Image (cartoon, rainbow, N blue to C red):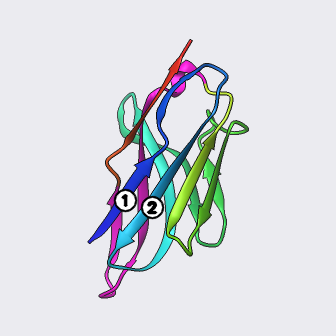
Amino acid sequence: QVQLVESGGGLVQAGGSLRLSCAASGSIRSINAMGWYRPAPGKQRELVAVITRGGNTNYADSVKGRFTISSDYAKNTVYLQMNSLKPEDTAVYYCNAQGVGLLGGTFGSWGQGTQVTVSS
């Protein structure tokens, strides 16, 4: 099994910054991609940002230019630097990791979520 532990959420005023971290552990052979998601109207969760092992990134249009995703795959860790936060960024942010387990099967795991609240 693969466990993801998120940290870094909290309460911040509009225009402020937060940095989220997510560390994966457990039965991991390799991780191919890690990302951050949040709930969205009409969807279970929407992609906020994702980064592959090769360093390719993808962002939701709503966060481009404000959020930066980075990773340290040697530590199976991903970060999300969130700047210029807006009240509409308020959500529970979930970390996701996709990869290959020690026994050779693929996995897709979710963290428990970390709350980000942006006050106006």
Q: What stretch is highlighted in magenta?
A: 86-110
Is residue 114 located in the magenta-colored stretch of the structure?
no
Taking depth in this image into account, of 74 and 101 the one nearest to the observer is 74
Residue at the limit of the structure toward the top, as seen here:
120
Q: Main secondary structure of the magenta part?
A: strand
Residue at numbered disc 1: 4
Q: Position of residue 100 (x, y in %)?
A: 39, 79
Q: Position of residue 54 (x, y in %)?
A: 64, 72
Disc with the residue nearer the chain's start (1 vs 2): 1
Q: Where is residue 66 in the image (x, y as percent from the top left)?
A: 69, 36
Which residue appears at 62% of the width and 27% of the height? 85
Quadrant where the image shows the C terminus: top right
39 shown above or below 88: below
Residue at the limit of the structure toward the bottom, as seen here:
103
Q: What element carries label 2?
A: strand
Q: Do the residues labelled 1 and 2 touch (CB within 8 Å)?
A: yes
